[in-house]
């Protein structure tokens, strides 16, 4: 049986000020995947060790 991936916790105050580096738009927190999601850019930015990696080249493209 596969164990679920560990969730990455992010400071809620940090989430309030972060924006997508591509669109400058809002991000939503996907706790299950440990990502910050920009629906406008169709990108999901990873969170590693509690630190959001806000580089477009590190982001995962969202499915259409």
Image (cartoon, rainbow, N blue to C red):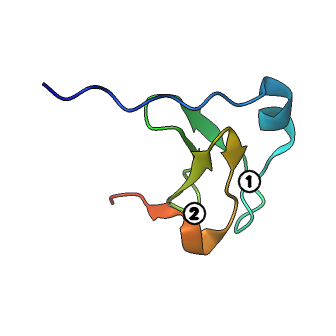
Within 10 Å of disc 2 (Cα), the crowding (few <14, some 14-19, many 20+) is: some
Q: Position of residue 41 (x, y in %)?
A: 57, 63
Q: Which mark is residue 41?
A: 2
Q: Is residue 6 above or below residue 50?
A: above
Q: Quadrant of the C terminus?
A: bottom left
Going by the picture, which residue comes out furthest to the bottom? 57
Element marked by disc 2: loop
Work out whether residue 42 or residue 5 is closer to the camera in this orientation and state it: 5
Q: Position of residue 51 (x, y in %)?
A: 71, 45
The residue at the point 45 percent across, 29 percent down is 6
The residue at the point 59 percent across, 57 percent down is 40
Q: Are marks 1 and 2 in contact (CB under 8 Å)?
A: yes
Q: Position of residue 54 (x, y in %)?
A: 70, 60
Work out whether residue 32 or residue 28 is closer to the camera in this orientation and state it: 32
Using residue 10 as the reference point, say whether residue 35 is left or right of it. left
Using residue 30 as the reference point, say whether residue 17 is left or right of it. right
Q: Which residue is mark 1?
A: 25
């Amino acid at each position: 049986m596969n164990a679920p991936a560990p969730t990455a916790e992010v400071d809620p105050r940090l989430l309030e000020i972060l924006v997508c580096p591509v669109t400058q738009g809002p991000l939503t927190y996907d706790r299950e995947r440990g990502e910050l999601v920009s629906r406008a850019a169709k990108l999901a930015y990873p969170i590693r060790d509690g630190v959001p990696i806000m580089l477009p080249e590190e982001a995962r493209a969202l499915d259409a």
